[in-house]
């Protein structure tokens, strides 16, 4: 099945490469966007997007140790980038990705480091209890004395990945590889080149290996029912893995039905809690402000773990001292923040300018040039801080800030470390999925729960092998 070609190619626009079951597909038969911010893509063959259930999965019988060998070699090749595939992806991403080039350069330089055996073994051990359940059957004895077994079977997955950080593509490929399943990756419009560069590198280091045939990565416009209505079907796939904002998740849900399960990395935001201990000395205050700025500028505040609202325990005079230091700290160069200043969007700038006119109620530090700006208010502002804008809210007690935590809160950074243990149960019960020391929001480790669940556990299909035993009333089902 070939999709129709809707438009002529945009002259000079970046061209996407598709990766289809170990092979590279090129072409500019389809075009998207405008002449100022557009790209072209090869024609879309729907047959290449699916794996028929009548055929065995390519890597199902490959030991996990061998799969990790391929992934480790892929990581080493990505770090060397002798073929220039990552360099090419970087150049093209710099034209289409909203992140500044300096952030992209540092992100691409670190991609190969994700593919280490130690990191992958940690994921498998923490999320599945070991590789035995991937390579075979784990035997258990039930309370009734039956000897049974279960295993994690390779899944058939669609991945609608986020494009706010290149590491999402790398993490998706690693997780999918470890499960031994097959994966269709929908390339996001804000990261069109990372996934295919990684997969092409894998195919180069392990030509013809079954793992290389487990992936297809292609672009179509999200919500295109000509594609999704045909492909997002349980006869082809078991799991729909969706990252992104509310519109992305809701659109993904349109295609769900019996046999096709949604695994959702929901849209999240993050906050910081700063205790009054920060005002014990000038050094402590500077440290707290620096850690808080580090958490607020992760990928220029585009990461879910990036703090936008900060609740500070103290009176207004103390909190204003903190805000001034935070505004200066937001401007410091950091590995995950850009040195490039991009003026705030007009609507956000207008919101902030209106607050400047009410100094009795709001404090504003910084300019709208994208270098970093802080707003102090008695309650959280009713607009969404973005582009290195942080809203600081004074509280009498950090416990009072817990009411602002909900199920959409991903990360809560706490200062000082000594206050974390007393607060973590409260913020967890309120809905947060991650509690960290202030300044550690960027340190997301695969193998620990992510967004409130263990991804590998959700990705695989769990199957039991049960023997006869004494007949008892079923617990369920």
Image (cartoon, grey):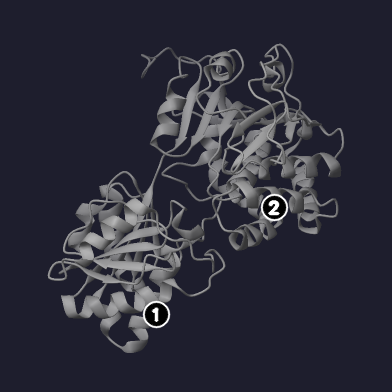
- Which percent across, then down, holds residue 350? 29, 56
Q: Residue furthest left?
A: 360
Q: CA distance from mark 2 to mark 1?
A: 34 Å
Q: Which mark is residue 335?
A: none
In the image: residue 87, left or right of residue 435: right
SS class, disc 2: helix
* Any part of residue 439 in sight: no
**Taking 430 as reference, is 45 above or below it?**
above
Whether residue 298 is visible here, answered yes or no, is yes
Left or right of residue 394: residue 191:
right
Residue at 24 percent of width and 77 percent of height? 320
The residue wearing badge 1 is: 287
Up/down of 83 relative to 188, above or below: below
Quadrant position of residue 228: top right
Q: Position of residue 276 (x, y in %)?
A: 24, 76
Task: Point out the image quarter for the N terminus.
Answer: top right
Neighbours of disc 2 within 10 Å: few (<14), some (14-19), many (20+) = many
Question: Where is 149 relative to 4, above or below?
Answer: below
The residue under label 2 is 90
In the rendered image, which quarter contains the C terminus? top left
Mark closer to the chain start, 2 or 1: 2
For residue 221, what is the image quadrant?
top right
Q: Secondary structure at mark 1?
A: helix
Mark 1 surroundings: few (<14), some (14-19) or many (≥20) residues within 10 A: many
Residue 312 position, x and y percent, is 25, 69
Which residue: 33% across, 74% down? 416
Q: Is residue 468 left or right of residue 27?
A: left
């Amino acid at each position: 099945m070939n999709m129709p070609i809707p438009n002529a190619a945009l002259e000079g626009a970046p061209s996407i490469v598709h990766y289809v079951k170990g092979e590279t597909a090129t072409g500019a038969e389809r075009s998207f966007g405008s002449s100022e911010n557009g790209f072209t893509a090869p024609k879309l063959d729907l047959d290449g997007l699916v794996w028929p259930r009548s055929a065995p999965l390519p890597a199902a019988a490959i030991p996990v140790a061998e799969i990790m060998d391929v992934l480790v070699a892929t990581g080493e090749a990505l770090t060397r980038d002798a073929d220039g595939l990552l360099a090419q992806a970087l150049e093209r991403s710099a034209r289409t990705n909203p992140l500044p080039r300096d952030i992209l350069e540092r992100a691409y330089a670190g991609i190969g480091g994700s593919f280490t055996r130690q990191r992958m073994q940690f994921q498998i051990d923490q999320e599945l209890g070991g590789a035995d359940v991937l390579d075979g059957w784990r035997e258990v004895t039930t309370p009734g004395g039956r000897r049974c077994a279960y295993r994690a079977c390779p899944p058939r997955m669609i991945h609608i990945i986020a494009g706010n950080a290149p590491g999402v593509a790398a993490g998706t490929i690693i997780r999918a590889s470890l499960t031994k399943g097959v994966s269709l990756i929908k390339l996001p419009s804000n990261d069109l080149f990372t996934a295919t560069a990684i997969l092409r590198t894998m195919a180069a280091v392990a030509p013809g290996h079954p793992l290389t045939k487990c992936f297809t990565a292609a672009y179509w416009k999200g919500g295109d029912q000509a594609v999704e209505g045909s492909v997002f079907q349980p006869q082809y796939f078991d799991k729909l893995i969706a990252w992104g904002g509310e519109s992305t998740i809701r659109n993904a849900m349109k295609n769900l039905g019996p046999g096709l399960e949604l695994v959702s990395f929901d849209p999240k935001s993050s906050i910081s809690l700063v205790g009054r201990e920060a005002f014990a000395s000038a050094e402590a205050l500077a440290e707290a402000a620096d850690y808080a700025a580090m958490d607020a500028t992760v990928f220029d505040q585009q990461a879910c773990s990036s703090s936008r609202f900060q609740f500070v325990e103290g009176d207004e005079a103390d909190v204003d001292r903190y805000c001034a230091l935070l505004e200066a700290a937001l401007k410091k160069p950091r590995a995950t923040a850009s040195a490039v200043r991009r003026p705030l969007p007009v609507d956000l700038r207008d919101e902030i300018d209106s607050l400047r006119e009410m100094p009795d109620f709001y404090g504003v530090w910084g300019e709208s040039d994208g270098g970093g700006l802080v707003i102090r208010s008695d309650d959280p502002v009713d607009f969404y801080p973005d582009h290195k804008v942080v809203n600081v809210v004074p509280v009498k007690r950090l416990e009072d800030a817990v009411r602002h935590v909900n199920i959409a809160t991903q990360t809560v950074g706490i200062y000082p470390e000594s206050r974390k243990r007393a607060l973590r149960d409260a913020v967890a019960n309120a809905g947060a999925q991650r509690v960290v020391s202030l300044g550690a929001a960027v340190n997301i480790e695969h193998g620990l729960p992510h967004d409130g669940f263990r991804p590998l556990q959700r990705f695989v299909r769990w199957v039991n092998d049960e023997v006869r035993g004494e007949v008892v009333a079923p617990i369920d089902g």
